[in-house]
């Protein structure tokens, strides 16, 4: 097992690619092919890389279950609490500024509070407790007998499909308020199990791909050949994901909507994630990947702030007023969305600098100041 304190740039870049796909998806408002492609693995890649890192760092063997939980409570759940409070303060302040009635403001506070305690999370904040619970499940299950570990690779697939159908039925049977009350805890559990599956698969893929070869058995030539083979496999998996994305519609992991073909979605999530990791592992030898690495290292901050604090809408409206926004999918529309994303990321540069400089605990960083590898 490779255990090293050195950061893996290609894994930072993979998370960076993931957060850029997420931000792009939050900007687009049309059912276009690129958005459908991104939706197949833009969240799965975070869970997959998390499992990959759990193997590489050896943290599951290095720490007991209790120690692991304490470390990740600091790196994931403490930021969850901090951002949830910040987002609520921002929303309530905006409501007062707009002159909204007290009843609506009170309702917002109660709704945010229920989202927080059920770990449903407001907007993108669901991701942090979801990742924490998924990692904790793996830390516990990996210590259990082999047959339970094998079952844990199969059961989440069926349970995810079950929860997808259950939530769809509940939405048709309950009014909006009752659905929120019932669905929030279900969403927390179902998404944690769904995420766990990707974390586990990522861990297993790292077991197969990242084992150390003995020096005498690994000449430079054979090492180079292996790298080329892995790169070719990564390209093949990435192309497979593009094709699979054409078979799926209406995917929204936040609401546990797995689309028309849930099994294909889970396959595409793995193929897209592993394909990106293998391609980036090869590319990092030739390119510095600075932008992707930066966004990957700061993906927790970008995830939490790009939409919840109004920056996304500010950039969309500003671009629409100044340049115009295409009304249908096409080259102009994609260029518009990329332009909006560039402006949004410029704002995030300032946000990241502010948080890492003055509120590092909101970035998931430990006391040493280094980012926790398993946090996204």
Image: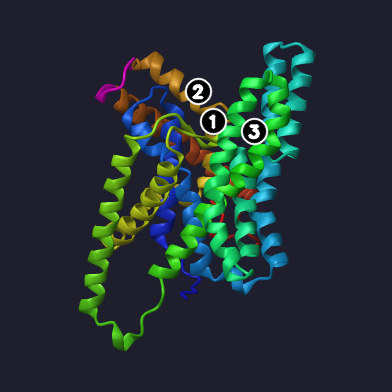
Secondary-structure class at tag 1 = loop
| Magenta segment | 326-332
Asked whether residue 106 appears in the rendered view, the answer is yes
Residue 307: numbered disc: 1
Secondary-structure class at tag 2 = helix
Residue sitting at x 40%, y 43%: 264
Q: Nearer the viewer, mark 3 or mark 2?
A: 3
Task: Report, in whole angstroms, how far the alpha carbon at label 3 lies from the one at label 2.
Answer: 17 Å
> First in sequence: mark 1 or mark 3?
3
Secondary-structure class at tag 3 = loop
Asked whether residue 41 appears in the rendered view, the answer is no
> First in sequence: mark 3 or mark 2?
3
Residue 123 percent across, percent down from the top left: 60, 32
Residue 293 percent across, percent down from the top left: 41, 53
Q: Which residue is mark 3?
A: 122
> Tag 1: Cα neighbours inside 10 Å, few (<14), some, or many (≥20)?
some
Q: Is residue 138 above or below residue 297?
A: below
Viewer-proximal residue among 130 and 349: 130
Viewer-proximal residue among 243 and 164: 164
Q: Are marks 3 and 2 in contact (CB under 8 Å)?
A: no
Q: Which residue is mark 2?
A: 313
Residue 60 percent across, percent down from the top left: 60, 68
Q: For the stretch drawn in magenta, what is the main secondary structure?
A: loop
Q: Nearer the viewer, mark 1 or mark 3?
A: 3
């Amino acid at each position: 097992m490779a255990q090293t304190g050195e950061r893996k740039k290609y894994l930072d870049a993979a998370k960076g690619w993931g957060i850029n796909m997420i931000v792009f998806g939050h900007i687009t408002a049309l059912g276009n092919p690129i958005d459908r492609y991104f939706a197949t693995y833009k969240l799965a890649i975070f869970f997959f890389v998390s499992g990959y890192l759990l193997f590489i760092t050896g943290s599951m063997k290095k720490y007991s279950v209790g120690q692991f939980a304490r470390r990740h409570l600091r790196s994931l759940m403490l930021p969850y609490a901090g951002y949830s409070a910040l987002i609520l303060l921002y929303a309530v302040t905006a409501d007062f500024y707009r002159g909204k009635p007290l009843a609506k403001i009170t309702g917002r506070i109660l709704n945010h509070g229920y989202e927080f305690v059920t770990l449903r999370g407001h907007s993108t904040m669901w991701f942090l407790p979801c990742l924490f619970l998924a990692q904790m499940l793996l830390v516990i299950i990996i210590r259990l007998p082999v047959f339970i570990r094998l079952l844990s690779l199969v059961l989440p697939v069926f349970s995810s499909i079950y929860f997808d159908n259950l939530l769809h039925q509940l939405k048709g049977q309950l009014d909006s308020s009752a659905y929120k009350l019932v669905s929030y805890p279900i969403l927390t559990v179902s998404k944690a199990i769904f995420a766990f599956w990707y974390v586990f698969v990522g861990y297993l893929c790292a077991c197969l791909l990242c084992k150390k070869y003995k020096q005498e058995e690994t000449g430079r030539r054979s090492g180079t050949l292996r790298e080329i083979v892995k790169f070719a496999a990564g390209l093949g998996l990435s192309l497979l994901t593009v094709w699979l994305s054409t078979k799926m519609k209406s995917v929204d992991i936040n609401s546990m909507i797995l689309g028309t073909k849930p099994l294909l979605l889970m396959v595409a999530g793995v193929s897209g994630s592993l394909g990106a990791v293998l391609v980036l592992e090869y590319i990092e030898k030739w390119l510095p990947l600075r932008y992707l690495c930066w966004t990957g290292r700061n993906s927790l901050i970008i995830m939490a702030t790009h939409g919840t604090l109004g920056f996304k809408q500010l950039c969309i409206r500003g671009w629409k007023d100044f340049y115009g926004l295409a009304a249908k999918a096409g080259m102009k529309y994609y260029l518009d969305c990329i332009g909006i994303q560039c402006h949004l990321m410029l704002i995030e540069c300032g946000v990241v600098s502010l948080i890492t400089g003055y509120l590092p605990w909101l970035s998931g960083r430990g006391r040493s100041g280094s980012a926790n590898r398993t946090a996204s």
